Image: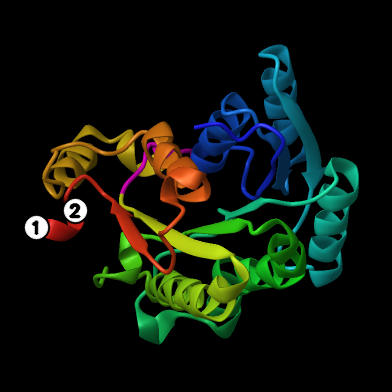
Amino acid sequence: MDLTGKTALITGAGTGIGRAAALRFAHAGARVVLAGRRAALLDDIAAEIRARGGEAVAHPVDVTDDAAVRALVRFAVEDGGGLDVVVNNAGYVPPWSPVHETSDDVWDLAFDVNLKGAFRLARAALPHLVERRGAIVNVASTSALRANHSVAPYSAAKAGLIALTRCIAAEYGWQGVRCNCVVPSWVETPMTESFLRDEKIRGDVARRHALQRVALPDEVARVILHLASDEAAFVTGAVYPVDGGFSAL
């Protein structure tokens, strides 16, 4: 896949799936704008990409701040001459709690990051994506497709992200903009590290997948890249499980 001459903006780019996607997009020739809350991590990834001969710039952002999100999009467009791809990967998993013990603050933050953050970025980016007939790839979760105990805010927000994906696809397809969604299950990331370091938990989680293991971030990043590229030119409004058969069992 050749993305030479294209600019890709990736949120949550400092670790996990976002980091892997940034490396994949850069390897495919894209200029990558790395966005996230932790500047040091973004700088490290940008330096790694440049050391490999790619193009990358870091731009810290809090996706709950609409002014900051709009500034991020302006930076991506002005610095790179346009915007072709947006990957909404920023995420927040709230503390586990049953519904009757979940506070408004926890619920609101889960929605503000996982759903409204993606909405804010899409809203700011869409006029520019229309100009370039670009693509959006949203990162949801299998928690949006099947119930899990004690993560209702996260599950509900990610389910909303799937609905938002379909709405954008329907509204902007006639202008050449595609919008798709990947749905990972358990992935080996800093977000899951505290659980997966326990061998019993890891074994229990692995057995819930047809492939009997958890994913590596790059395995999800490959699908994100495919959906953003011309290889998926006739794919929009799609919800892609990247879950090792988790949702099949």
- Position of residue 188 relative to residue 162, above or below, is above
Residue 130 is covered by the magenta coloring: no
Quadrant holding the C terminus = bottom left
- For label 2, the residue is 246
Q: Position of residue 132 (x, y in %)?
A: 71, 56
Q: Residue at x 34, y 77 (%)?
A: 98
Residue 34: quarter of image:
top right
Image mark for residue 249: 1
The magenta stretch is 186-193
Q: Position of residue 153 (x, y in %)?
A: 45, 75
Q: Residue at x 15, y 45 (%)?
A: 204
Could you say whether the residue bearing mark 1 is in a helix, strand or loop? loop
Q: Position of residue 233 (x, y in %)?
A: 46, 53
User: How far is disc 2 from disc 1 in space, using C-alphas?
Assistant: 6 Å
Q: Residues within 10 Å of mark 1 (few under 14, many from 20)?
A: few
Q: Residue at x 82, y 55 (%)?
A: 72
- Residue 106 visible (yes or no): no
Residue 2: quarter of image:
top right
